[in-house]
Image (cartoon, helix red, strand yellow):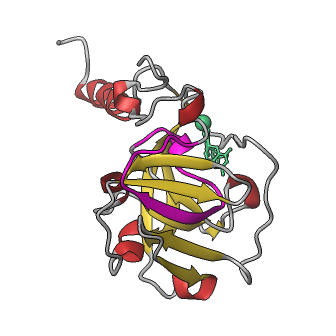
Amino acid sequence: MGTFSPGFHGRARGLADKLPPGQYPTESFPVLSAGPTPRVPTETWTFTVTTENGDSRGWTWDEMMALPQEDTVHDIHCVTRWSKFDTPWRGVPVDAFLEDVETAADYAVAVSHGGYTTNLPLEDLLDGKAWVVHTYDGFPLSPEHGGPARLLVPHLYFWKSAKWVRELRLTLEDEPGFWESVGYHNYGDPWREQRTWDD
Ligand SMILES: Nc1nc2c(c(=O)[nH]1)N[C@H]1C(S)=C(S)[C@@H](COP(=O)(O)O)O[C@H]1N2
Ligand SMILES: [Mo]
């Protein structure tokens, strides 16, 4: 005990608290896209919530920007093992889009321009745990990182944060998305190292 100064001990514990098992921290912001980068103009951008009955509610860009906005800072964790600490975003909590939506769904599928999908329990999108973000570090989110707007679900591996998100489909049954269908873990908790089906 006596050989460690309180300052050293504090920093060491800080990293362990922030870095999930099997991850390494990076300063860069890698781009990981399964296909080409869609270019979605804000003039034609819409975001739609569709319920299990097929009812839907949609927002244009201006309507989305008129919703209450939040600045929010998070560590993000990619299943390819990089973690990036303290990433600063601005956007709309997913709660705002679901406020007036009547649903009995327990699950959601995020659907992106270009066809990417990812599934998650609806509750993982609620209570301030997920956002539709349009700004990164004070600048409009670049197309490579999912601009004009992407989902941000920082408590799960970053593949759950669908770039170029255009729809949330609420479902009664869990429906595996793009990566979840080919071997990635269905839930993807980085702290439990849920990388693949057998984790
Ligand atoms: N639409 C879409 N969203 C996506 C992906 C993708 O290929 N398409 N890749 C996912 C994966 S695996 C990761 S790690 C992050 C990468 O986001 P970044 O390119 O901004 O780092 O986006 C996720 N969201
Ligand atoms: Mo990823």
From the viewer's perspective, tell me whether residue 168 is left or right of residue 125.
right
Q: Where is residue 55 in the image (x, y as percent from the top left)?
A: 45, 76
Image quarter hosting the N terminus: top left
| Residue situated furthest front in the rendering | 53
Residue 159 lies in the magenta stretch: yes
Work out whether residue 178 or residue 171 is closer to the camera in this orientation and state it.
171
| Figure quadrant of residue 174 | top left
Q: From which residue to which does the magenta span run?
A: 156-177
Q: Residue at x 66, y 64 (%)?
A: 141
Q: Position of residue 122 (x, y in %)?
A: 35, 55
Relative to 190, say whether 64 is above or below.
below
Tag count: 0
Q: Residue at x 32, y 32 (%)?
A: 17
Q: Residue at x 48, y 47 (%)?
A: 119
Relative to 120, say whether 39 is above or below.
below
Image quarter hosting the C terminus: top left
From the viewer's perspective, tell me whether residue 115 is left or right of residue 180.
right
Q: Residue at x 45, y 77 (%)?
A: 69
| Residue situated furthest left in the rendering | 1
Relative to 20, say whether 111 is above or below.
below
Q: Where is residue 105 in the image (x, y as percent from the top left)?
A: 33, 59
Is residue 164 visible to the viewer in this orientation of the structure? yes
Q: Where is residue 192 in the image (x, y as percent from the top left)?
A: 34, 26
From the viewer's perspective, tell me whether residue 178 is left or right of residue 6.
right
Work out whether residue 180 or residue 18 is closer to the camera in this orientation and state it.
180
